[in-house]
Image (cartoon, coloured by chain):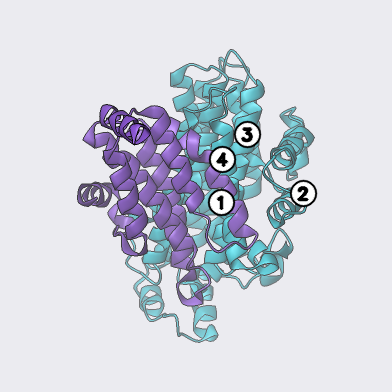
Amino acid sequence: MQETKQLLNHELPQQAGIHVTAGEDEASLRDMAELLLDYDMDPGERRIILGCYWLLLKAYRSHDHVHHAEVAGKAVLDGDFLLSFYLQFAVRHGFVDLVGDLARTNKRIQIRLAEGSRSATSQLHQRLTRFIAKRYSRRYATTQRFKQVTYDVI
Amino acid sequence: MTLSNDSLSQQLNISLDRVNRDLERIITYDQDLSSRSVVATSILDLIRAGGKRLRPLMVIVGSRFGESPENRDVYKLAAVCEFIHAASLIHDDILDEADTRRGQPALHRKVGTRTAVYVGNYITCRVIELLTEQDTELENYIQDLTSVTTTQLCLGEYQQMEQRYNFNITLEQYWEKTRNKTALLMAASLQAGARAGMADPKVAEALYQFGDQLGMAFQVRDDVLDYMQTADTLGKPAGADLRNGQVTLPAMIAMEDPFVREQLMQLTEDSPSEAFDEAVGLIRDCGALAKALDMSHEFMQKAWNISEELSHYCAHRDLQTLWRYFEERTY
């Protein structure tokens, strides 16, 4: 997570004045980071996927603050910027398929939020988990299978 | 005589009805969206309120420079560019605390700020969904249209926020903000159309430059109009930009006069309305508006030169029709 945070803060343009921290999303991010460790992938890829998830959560979090009148403008702008930066970040690092895979889920989340839901980001976690499972194989497949056999015998 | 936008599309032989129909279908055919949803009704109302549709027209004109003009993907991109523009307007109105848009209450005044934000987000997400659909090859446009362009739109807004009441803004900073906020999407629209129409990459690049120059001229003209027109015409007091702390080209030029500079430098958010009235009068009367329009003309001239360089394409006439539309709107 620390490396991903450094990467994001390095790539975010200074003009936006956004500094990425885990904040209220710490648990979701840690959960995703641990999930990513279960899969056989390059550490760089792990950072990009976690970075995309981080940017999206932060964008949603920012737009969730628009009801505070005194910060509404900045909250709108930061959320917009993070959403578009997520696309730029994903595409720049070769993850167009992730953008495509999450497109419909992101859209559905916006519909639910517009219609009054307070939070809908669990859908994002689920969809991203499916994307990872589809694209990568598990690192400890043998161990998992061994455990399953053991349970079956017991 | 000024061309209306209907006559612009007619001169370009482009059906605005088809463009509008495509826009509506993208919303009504979304299986995830109920027809009664506030998202659907809000967006359909916006589409039906009209608009110039300049960006879709630019996409279609751009495609005419290629071997495969006006194909299905071109019309899809035309809609995408209009939707990117629409989403940015919804959020801009929130940032600017605008009350109206196209003569109607701004969306956030109708449905509340929170909902309006998500309606704008929905549009952006729907655009991504369209670009990544399996039966198209539009993925390549994500980088050009949605990520780079919208990121730059936001950076333009950040720059505008940061520069409020900054009377020391440099010309370079002003051009950068103007390019990010206005010119880039016009440039990208023409270029995307050219690429989707299978145009030569060098031609696509020339069209990008044409759109950039046109967009810059357009924004400078808009900044001048803000001072020239009356409250009745604009629907807001003349010099509204200055009253919001935006130091645009006319004010920057006016400040070359030390007396005007001294007066403007005293303005703050808390200055009385009379102080702004006086400042607007000074900017109007010192010849700054004419000088700003001259600079806008320079951009227009460069755009014209690009259109001439493309004169071996029949479509260069369409480019010049677009140019005339901007020219007549401007002067």
Would you say the residues marked 4 and 2 are in contact, meaning their CB atoms lie under 8 Å apart? Answer: no
Q: Position of residue B5 (x, y in %)?
A: 73, 42
> Mark 1 sits on what residue?
A109
**Residue B320 visible in image:** no
Q: Position of residue A101 (x, y in %)?
A: 49, 35
Judge from the rendering whether residue B279 lies leftward or rightward of residue A18; answer left or right: right
Which residue corresponds to the image point at 40% horizontal and 45% vertical from the top-left? A86
Chain letter of the residue beneath label 1 in the structure image: A
Chain letter of the residue beneath label 3 in the structure image: B
Colour assignment, chain A:
purple
Q: Which chain is cyan?
A: B
Name the secondary structure under disc 1: helix
Q: CA distance from mark 4 to mark 2?
A: 18 Å
Badge 2: few (under 14), some or many (20 or more) residues near its Cα, within 10 Å? some
Judge from the rendering whether residue A59 lies leftward or rightward of residue A49; answer left or right: right
> Mark 4 sits on what residue?
A104
Chain letter of the residue beneath label 4 in the structure image: A
Whether B200 is drawn above or below B221: the answer is above
Badge 4: few (under 14), some or many (20 or more) residues near its Cα, within 10 Å? some
Q: CA distance from mark 2 to mark 1?
A: 17 Å
- In the drawing, what numbered circle is on residue B78? 3
Name the outermost residue toward the top: B67
Whether B159 is drawn above or below B264: the answer is above
Name the secondary structure under disc 3: helix
Q: CA distance from mark 1 to mark 3?
A: 25 Å
Do discs 4 and 2 share a chain?
no
Q: CA distance from mark 2 to mark 3?
A: 23 Å
